[in-house]
Amino acid sequence: MAEVSLPSPQQGRLQGRLGALAFSLSTSWSGISSAGLENGELVVRTTRDQLLPLMTYLRDAPHCRFEQMMDVCGVDYPSRVERFEVVYNLLSVTHNQRIRVIITTDETAPVASVAGLWPSACWWERECYDLFGVQFSGNPDMRRILTDDGFEGFPLRKDFPLTGYEEVRYDVERREVVKEPVSLVQDFRNFDFVSPWEGMMTLPGDEKAHEVRQHIKRSRG
């Protein structure tokens, strides 16, 4: 019989606090579509217009005190009207608890920046803009942060080609870095669908096994 691990009293108290906080948020904020525990973590979904008031409350309310912005990231669902989810991960050092806040947006609707509440969010929002194209209004430095200057497209969108649009290389003759369109010549590709074990050359001392394999292949053919 498999052993069932029971949560410790400390974990139980934490889950109780998070459950109470989820109930409080879902009943006191009209813009929250859902708030609850998912896999033991508190997840809140809200709207873009309620983002700043909610985040201010989560940072300053005595029973919340989420002092640290740990991460801002994006998720792309191309089939949705608002294809992007912007995910905020907050940490309360005071109460030793975490919360995840999620909003949705499309390719043009800007999201209010929370850099005024957590200065570190400036970098996270720039990364989300660089990789997904999500615009953050009020960000003091809305520039790309990971890709090159002049990069076209947003590489973490599901419709972005895996090969990209351009390749960067150093030209020895020109002594400079040049950008060129990606060119993949299909005629010179070698697609080998043979199992590496079947294509392996016979090793010394394995001649008999090789003869058996060849006999089996001929009999199947």
Image (cartoon, rainbow, N blue to C red):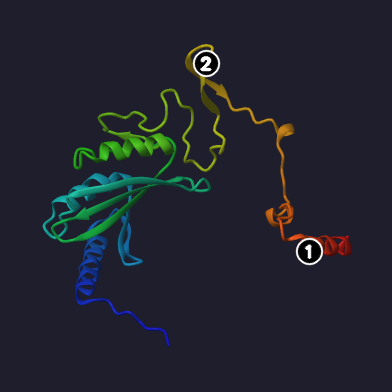
- Mark number, residue 44: none
Side (left or right) of 127 relative to 91: right
Query: Which amino acid type corresponds to the residue marked 1 in the rendered image?
Result: Lys
The percent coordinates of residue 175 (x first, y second) are: 48, 13
Q: Give the residue type at disc 2.
A: Val
**Residue 158 shown left or right of residue 211 in the figure:** left
- Residue lying farthest to the left in this orientation: 62
Q: Residues within 10 Å of mark 1 (few under 14, many from 20)?
A: few
**Residue 160 spot, x, y in % from top left:** 53, 37
Q: Vertically, is 17 above or below 3?
A: above
User: Quadrant location of the N terminus?
Assistant: bottom left
Q: Residue shown at 18%/47% (left/top)?
A: 56
Q: Tell me what residue is drawn at x 23 percent, y 76 percent.
A: 8
What is the quadrant of the C terminus in the image? bottom right
Number of residues whose C-alpha sits closer than 10 Å to that of mark 2, classed few (under 14), some (14–19) or many (20 or more)? few
Give x and y (percent) for residue 25.
24, 60
How many numbered circles does the render carry? 2
Q: Is mark 2 on a helix, strand or loop?
A: loop
Gap between marks 2 and 1, in whole Å?
52 Å
Q: Determine which residue is flagged by label 2.
A: 172
| Left or right of 87, for residue 156 | right
Q: Name the residue under label 1.
A: 208
Of residues 188 and 29, the one drawn nearer to the viewer in this rendering: 188
Q: Which of marks 2 and 1 is in front?
A: 1
Whichever of callouts 2 and 1 sits on the residue coming sooner in the sequence is: 2
Q: Is mark 1 on a helix, strand or loop?
A: helix
Where is 23 relative to 190, above or below? below
Choose top left, top right, bottom left or bottom right for residue 7: bottom left
